[in-house]
Every structure is written in structure tokens, then in C-alpha cells.
Image (tube, grey):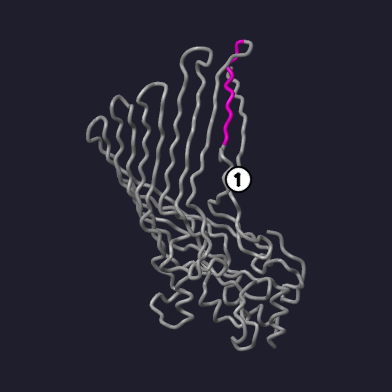
Amino acid sequence: IGAASGDPTGTSTSTALGSYYLGTFAKSKGTSWMIGAAYDVTKDITVYISRSQSFRPNGNSGAIYVISALNTRAATLGLDPIAELERIRNEGADTILGNETGLNTEFGVKTSLWDSKLVSTLSFFQLDREGEALEDIQRQMADPLNYTGPNLSGTFDPNPNNGGVRWYSNTSKRRVEGAELEIIWTPVRSYQLVASGSWLWKAKTLLDSSINPDGTDAATLTRKYYTYDFRMPGTPEYRLNLFNTYTLNRGFADGLRVSLGARYSSEMNINNSQNYDSKNGGLTAGDYVVFDGNLSYPWRLWGHAITTSLNVTNLFDKEYSEGGGDLTASVAGYSLSPPRTWMLINTLSF
């Protein structure tokens, strides 16, 4: 990350995010492991269990702020801009948050029945995540720079572009519980169905020490609503995918493969934050059905095997969103997923 120009004491007029201002390179490392066991009940049925630990660098610092805007707001509130910048840095604004870690448990059964004509996996899982970077609403509401008036008065406005400080913490604990079924059915050589579906019956925040989930005052309830009692972002309750493939095996079209698939997702939250206030309806995506298709044909040229494939995603050019984008000053709204997309692929085998 390149450092912005200016005086690091805080008199810079740079509009670079404050958390990037110091221009430091932070190293992140962690440990992941997995252990599992499987038992063959019969030659066609296997039960298994696994447990694993994972980590992901957060990539977040303790706060996001814009130095020039912070200077302006501090002066408007009658505060010393340099002292305020020093204060938030001493309180951890430029501290790199630790890794997000996960502990995952899965058990299930795998089958291969009727001479492998029906292959399936049914799994149940619990995914625990700790240390995800979430907005620290309590610190934001207690910071004098996040108000348009002195002494926490006026309008609450933590937007960094307006001089506010968006504080973050990684004290959260979240849990996802669900089941997934995947089936590959090949009743005859020329036809195959691949189907998968999932049901995530729990996707909740269990703990966030920056929020008091039992508070009764209006401000605390507002903080609670951002995270508690609403589904985690990016986790629809139901997903279903179907893909049918038929291969012709006679005549001039021998080897032509025709595929048609469908993807379904139930509604999901995009984010739980001040930008996406779940209490007031939030912003959601999903509850869509999208179709995909594929044509593939093998042929020969000068003795070489060639396969030509035409892949089309979003076959009927449906407008839908799987989540994405942001509600910021520079990106209004959220991103739609790609429209109908064609891809022609030729594969030459020697």
C-alpha cells in the first residue's frame, strides 16, 4: 500500500483513507488443519466425519477515516485536528485486526449404488467463525467526530468522507448450521443428472462484545438490530442446482452433448451495517431462478481430435443479483450479476 503525501502529524490535505495513510505493509499468518475418518458400512455406502480449522486475513484496520475530512470536521466542532488524529490512532484506528478463524465440523454419508448409476453425498455441517471484522457501532456512536454538533449533538454521521470515523472490531462469533445433498444420476450411458441442494437453517451472530444484545435503550436496540436477529449477509437459506446432460450416440450427430441447467437461490441479506439497515428493510438479493446451457461436439481435423463447446450462462438474460456492490458515495446501489454470457471454446487434443 503506497503512502499518501503529506505531514503524518495530521495536517495533510490528502483524501486517502486514513487507515492506508501510513503506507505500511502488514504481514499476516495463521495455522489451518483438518482431521477426518471414514467407515465403509458396505462396499457402496460410506459414513464419514471431519473437523477442520481455517483462517482468513481480515485485511481491516481498526477504523476507516479520511484525514482531510477529519481535519475539517474537528475544526468545525472546535477540536484540535492534530490532537483528534493522534487520539484515534492511539485508540487503535491504524491497528491491523487479527485473522478471522473458523472451526468446521461435518459428517455425512456417501453412496455409490446400482453399479455407480446413483452416486450421492448427504452431509450435515456446523461452521463457527470468530474474529470477523464488523462495524463497531458502539464505538462509532461514542466518538465525537461522528456528530455534526459538539458534545455528541447534532446529526449522527460516521461517513469518513464527511469527517467521521468508521470503527471496526473483530470480537464477533458467528455460526452456520445446515445440510447439503448432492446426487449424480446416470440411468443410461447417454443421460446424466447432477443435482445439489442446501438448507442453512441457522446463520446467526452468537456474540459481539461491541454490542449489548440485552440492552433496552433506543441506541442499544439500534446497534443490536444491525447484527442480531437478522440473517448473516451472503447466506441464503435455500439453494438448488440442477444440470441435465444428454449425449447423442448415433447418426451424423454422434457425440453431440446437450446440457441444460437451472440455479435457484432464496432471498439473502447483502450486508448488516449502517449502509444496509436490516431494521428498516435492509437491502436483499436473491429469490431467483436462472438457466444455463451448453452444446459440445467432438470432431476431427487432419487427424487431430477437436471439441467445440458453446457455453451460455443466464440463458434468458434475467436481471438478478447474487449480492455485491456497495452503497457508498462512489458506487450507488448494488451490482447485478452478469447478463447472458456466451463463451465459445475449442479444445485441440494431440
Residue furthest toward the left? 41
Q: Residue at x 45, y 58 (%)?
A: 101
Q: Nearer the viewer, residue 45 or 87?
A: 45
Task: Please state the extent of the stretch shown in magenta in the rendering.
Answer: 303-312
Quick check: 247 left or right of 43? right
**Quadrant (top left/top right/bottom left/bottom right) for the N terminus:** bottom right
Q: Is residue 307 magenta?
A: yes
Label 1: which residue? 338
Seen at 49% across and 80% down, the residue is 219
Q: Quadrant of the C terminus?
A: top right
Q: Position of residue 174 (x, y in %)?
A: 41, 62
SS category of the residue bearing label 1: loop
> Residue at point 27% right, 36% down?
46
Front in this rendered view, residue 142 or 286: 286
- Dominant secondary structure of the residues highlighted in magenta in the image: strand
Q: Is residue 151 toward the left or the right of residue 247 in the image? A: right
Q: Position of residue 159 (x, y in %)?
A: 63, 72
x%, y% of residue 339?
61, 44
Left or right: 206, with 312 as reference point? left
Q: Amino acid at mark 1?
A: Pro
**Any magenta on residue 315?**
no
Residue in the foreground of this view, choosing between 183 and 191: 191
